[in-house]
Image (cartoon, grey):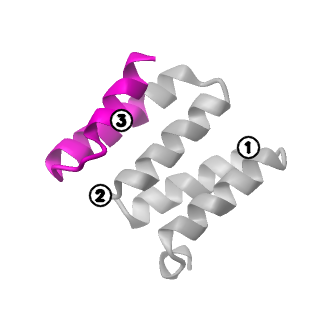
Amino acid sequence: MLAAVPSQIIQSLGDISFFDGQKDQAIALLENNIKSNPKSINSHYALASLYEKNKQPKKALEYFNKTLNLAKQQNSPFIGYIEVKLIE
C-alpha cells in the first residue's frame, strides 16, 4: 500500500508521527519507506535523523553511514553534507 505513496509524503508522515509522540509508528513508516525505496538517499537520511532525534545514536550512525554510502554510489552532491553530519 505505501509503495504507491510518494517517498517524500511518507517521510513527512514519519516526522508528523514522531512529533505527535508516536515514535514507534514514525520509525516503522520510515523503515517501510526504505524497503520500498532502498536506494533513496533521502529516505535513509530521514530515518537517520529520526533515530538521532529519538536519542538512538547507534542506529542514527548506522543510517547516516548507509546514507553516505548511497550518496557515494550515486555520486550525489549530498556527500559533503552527510560527511559533516557524521563529524558532529
Q: From this viewpoint, which residue is outermost toward the top?
A: 87
Would you name the residue on which mark 1 appears? 23
The one nearer the camera, 71 or 33, is 71
The one nearer the camera, 58 or 11, is 11
| SS at mark 3 in the image | helix
Q: Which residues are magenta?
A: 62-88
Res 55 label = none
Q: Is residue 87 above or below residue 36?
A: above
Would you name the residue on which mark 3 appears? 81
Percent from the top left, x then y, of residue 85? 42, 27
Q: Is residue 9 above or below residue 75?
A: below
> What residue is drawn where x is 31% and y is 28%?
83
Would you name the residue on which mark 2 appears? 39
The answer to the question of whether label 1 and label 3 lie on touching residues, with beta carbons closer than 8 A, is: no
Image quadrant assignment for residue 63:
top left
The reply to whether the magenta stretch includes residue 9 is no
The amino acid type found where label 1 is placed reads Lys
Pick whichever of labels 1 and 3 is earlier in the sequence.
1
The amino acid type found where label 2 is placed reads Lys
Image quadrant assignment for residue 23:
top right
The amino acid type found where label 3 is placed reads Tyr
> What residue is drawn where x is 42% and y is 47%?
44
| SS at mark 2 in the image | loop
